[in-house]
Image (spheres, grey):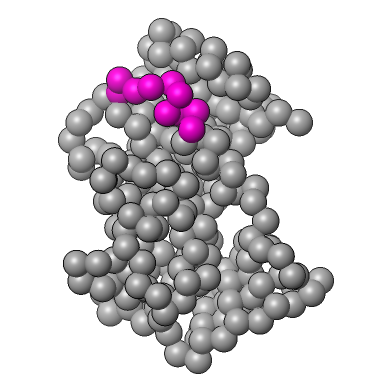
């Protein structure tokens, strides 16, 4: 079945351009023109991804992101913004967007980023059964895309999960921000690595006892990050039943 993409933009010329290119690439596309309309489309359309403009009537993109995540809706979101201020972009990421693009943008680049998100969410985590990463209180189930702390489920966005799983696969290794961009987002952000820092901050808030004194995701000054932790083990479980 075709992947479904909801485009939310109040500029008809922009939404028509995006719709044309995404349909040409084989996606099922619907367009709405204000933030409130997103929630009217969730049940009847069930989008696999949302392309969301920041500046919208009735309910802006930040409010839409915040409300979706509040409802535990983990649909991937690519936010579009005409604003050049980095703070506005980071605010979008802080409120649940997986990626952002600044207008004007290339439709082909938008398509590439959407394809990268789908590749990451659909790719099998690995072969040889279900890989379970156990690091202290933290357990990551690769196939099930589940994370638990002390046996309790942790609610992560798709991108947060992919970032944590990538860190688990390279446990103990120092990874630069560019390596994380390439490994998790599947493309380079033209040198803008702040998206990594935002997602690391979100992960720490969710899995660490104290995000300011982390025991798992460590910062390596002037380099990047590494996943550490006590009693780190990894096991391969065939046909695991949870």
Residue 191 percent across, percent down from the top left: 26, 45
> Can residue 46 be seen by looking at this rendering?
yes
Judge left or right: residue 135 versus residue 175.
right
* Farthest-out residue, bottom: 231
Residue 173 percent across, percent down from the top left: 40, 75
Magenta-colored span: 103-112
Q: Which quadrant would the C terminus be assigned to in this image?
A: bottom right
Considering depth in this image, is 226 or 28 the residue closer to the camera? 226
Considering depth in this image, is 94 or 177 the residue closer to the camera? 177
Q: Is residue 230 magenta?
A: no
User: Residue at 61% across / 36% down in the picture?
Assistant: 48
12 over 154 or under it: above or below: above
Q: Which quadrant would the N terminus be assigned to in this image?
A: top right
138 over 116 or under it: above or below: below
Residue 125 falls in image quadrant = bottom right
Considering depth in this image, is 85 or 111 the residue closer to the camera? 111
């Amino acid at each position: 079945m075709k992947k479904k993409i909801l485009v939310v933009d109040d500029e008809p010329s922009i939404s028509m351009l995006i719709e044309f290119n995404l349909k040409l690439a084989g996606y099922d596309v619907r367009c709405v023109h204000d933030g409130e309309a997103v929630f009217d489309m969730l049940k009847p359309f069930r989008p696999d991804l949302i392309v969301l403009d920041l500046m919208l009537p009735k309910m802006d993109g930040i409010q839409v992101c915040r409300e979706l995540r509040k409802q535990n809706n983990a649909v991937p979101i690519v936010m579009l913004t005409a604003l050049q201020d980095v703070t506005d972009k980071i605010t979008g990421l802080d409120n649940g967007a997986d990626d952002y693009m600044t207008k004007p943008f290339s439709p082909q680049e938008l398509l590439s980023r959407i394809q990268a998100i789908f590749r990451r969410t659909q790719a099998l985590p690995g072969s040889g059964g279900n890989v379970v990463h156990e690091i202290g209180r933290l357990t990551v189930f690769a196939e099930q895309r589940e994370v638990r702390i002390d046996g309790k489920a942790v609610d992560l966005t798709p991108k947060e999960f992919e970032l944590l799983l990538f860190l688990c696969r390279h446990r103990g290794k120092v990874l630069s921000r560019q390596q994380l961009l390439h490994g998790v987002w599947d493309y380079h952000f033209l040198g803008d690595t702040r998206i990594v820092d935002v997602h690391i901050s979100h992960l720490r808030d969710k899995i660490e006892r104290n995000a300011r004194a982390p025991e798992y995701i460590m910062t390596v000054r002037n380099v990047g990050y590494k996943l550490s932790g006590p009693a780190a083990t990894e096991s391969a479980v065939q046909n695991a039943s949870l």
